Amino acid sequence: MKKRIEINVALEVFAKEEWSEIDASLLAEAERILEIAHAPYSNFLVGAALLLEDGQIFSANNQENVSFPVGVCAERAVLSYAMGNNPNTAPVKLAIVAKRRAGMELATVTPCGLCRQTINEYEFKFGKPIEILMLGPGDEMYRASGIDQLLPFRFSDLNS
Ligand code: THU
């Protein structure tokens, strides 16, 4: 072996008492909107709420399609809409809440690969990390400080 490249990543977990007011609002909004997702094929409900640096909050849910690959995740839905309408305002926090099906307890979902790459795009565009908050059962909030923690070896030139 000529060299070994190692990146350490971490998620931090916070109890409800430790959440900031804005974290609680974003998680509540993601939890509200997951209930009205269009997910008749998987029944898996996902809500995402995005905070922009100017204080605006946007939210969306997963939108499935009878042609399965056409479906869109909650995270990409909210990022596309919010960034499409606010191309000059950095996103700063993204909350994600999911349930395996209506009426079940929360599933602790981390974003899929496509969504991670999309989050990376807007971190790169604005040069600012996007905190990713994921809610689990028992009011435990998992926090990634930025996409580095979820997509450490992303598409990039290792030598630049
Ligand atoms: N889904 C999301 O909305 N976000 C994720 O991060 C993972 C998966 C959606 C896609 C599909 O509608 C359903 O959850 C099951 O995969």
Image (cartoon, helix red, strand yellow):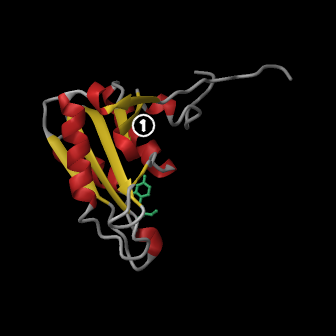
Image x and y of residue 8, in percent: 60, 23
Ligand 1 quarter of the rendering: bottom left
Q: Position of residue 127 (x, y in %)?
A: 35, 24
Circle 1 residues within 10 Å: few <14, some 14–19, many ≥20: many
Q: Residue at x 26, y 52 (%)?
A: 31
Q: Position of residue 105 (x, y in %)?
A: 38, 56
Say which quadrant the C terminus sits in. top right
Q: Is residue 81 visible?
A: no
Foreground: 76 or 10?
10
Q: Is residue 73 above or below residue 92?
A: below
Q: Secondary structure at mark 1?
A: helix
- Most distant residue in the right direction: 1
> In the rendered structure, which amino acid carries the disc numbered 1?
Asn
Residue closer to the observer: 50 or 84 = 50
Q: Which residue is mark 1?
A: 120
Q: Return the x and y of residue 144 as percentages of the image width and height.
A: 43, 31
Q: Quadrant of residue 26?
A: top left
Position above or below: 79 against 7: below
Query: Can you say which quadrant of the picture contains the N terminus?
Result: top right
Residue displayed at 53% across by 36% down: 151
Q: Number of labelled discs? A: 1
Does residue 4 appear in this view? yes
- Indicate left or right for 41 with 18 as reference: right
- Judge by depth and name the residue closer to the eye, 147 or 105: 105
* Quadrant in which residue 47 is drawn: bottom left
